[in-house]
Image (tube, rainbow, N blue to C red):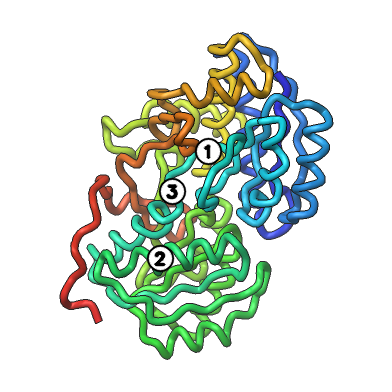
Amino acid sequence: MYIGAMFDLTGPFAPVGTAERQAFTLAVAQAERDTGIRVRTRVEDSRTSPDTAVKITREFLRDKVSAIVGPTPTQLCDPAHRLTDASRTPMFCITPFPEKTTPSLFLVDAPRVTLVGDVPARFMQKRGWRRVACIYTADAGGKGYADAINQAAPKYGLKVVASESFQQGDTDLTAQLTKIRAAKPDVVYSCSSGANLIAVLKGMAQLRMAQPVFAGHASVNYDIAHLAAPNLPPGGLFSDASPVLIPDQVPSGMAGAAKAKQFADAYVKAHGGKRPDTVAGYVADTVAIIAQAAKAAGSTDRKSLARQIEKTCGYEGVLGRYCFSPANHRGLASESNMIVRWTPTGTFTLTEVLSSQNAPAPSPSAG
């Protein structure tokens, strides 16, 4: 089997892309052991560039890869996956943001509004934070965060009181954060991915903003946690987390807990003590699902793989249980969500577990 992969190994997503590449190498070796299928790979740097992602995708298709892992940023996934439908080459983008999947596009994540809208909104509601400010990157990913929290907020009695944007890689956010401070939010949602969170935290520290911050889903990794540590807000920095991120803190019985611990231990051993993060888990589960589908299909043909992935249901990976179908290319079931607090030592502490449930009625106290 031949798998092409693209990760952002340079640019603002580099901390995420590096973890993804390390997880990919480990996952491929595990998949070969589990299935007995020899896996040939090609890994490219998508450089947080849509044009580069498109170029790489075309090269992969010419090489007749069996499946494609990546890209991660939404602005790269959108143009890249449009190229794979004709051959029905399975492409797993490592993002929840595409609103619709296609015959070739698969996702190992919950729907966008659930993951980056409902989850933080439910946590904010439980904390009594009613007034939310969103600072987002002016790209498809950042706008996806902003749209999601705007859709989710009314369901939980929250009000988005400020929404400001900035460009990927900007380091001075004084103007945007000054406007946000004037709106008097209870909490600031960093609606961005990768290391963009650091600029938000530094800017808030310079303006002496004490509000708690909820970090964007794709900013949550140990490299960024160490960068964030000197500028943690007095109100705390929080985010959602996966079993892979905090394997020793996962409640017993949670789907994926045992495999997450095994994967995390193997990752730490293979990478000199470096710990994996959630996106590493996405990559690990993606490779495993592709390999298991190839074994079940008895073929590495692209169309056969796509059809077999659609039949995959009940598989438990490092992030939880998966169930795909022809009508559902988002495999991960949303069973529960863990919330962590970031620590001054660059680690994460489990704060709360939000069980899967329907949205409550809006609070009459919301302003």
Q: What's under tag 1, amino acid-wise? A: Tyr
Residue 111 is labelled as 3
Q: Are marks 2 and 3 in contact (CB under 8 Å)?
A: no
Which residue is at 51% across, 37% downward? 281
Image coords of residue 270 (percent x, y) = 61, 29
Which residue is at 62% across, 48% downward? 72
The image quadrant of residue 234 is bottom left
Residue at disc 1, secondary structure: helix
Q: Which residue is mark 1?
A: 282
- Seen in the picture, residue 31 relative to 278 is either above or below; the reply is above
Q: What's under tag 3, amino acid-wise? A: Pro
The image quadrant of residue 175 is bottom right
Q: Earlier in the sequence, mark 3 or mark 1?
A: 3
Q: Which residue is mark 2?
A: 149
Position of 138 with respect to 127 (left or right) is right
Label 3 to label 1, Cα distance in Å? 14 Å
Quarter of the figure with the C terminus: bottom left
Image coords of residue 328 (percent x, y) = 45, 36
- Seen in the picture, residue 208 relative to 202 is either above or below; the reply is below
Q: Earlier in the sequence, mark 2 or mark 3?
A: 3
Q: What's under tag 2, amino acid-wise? A: Ile
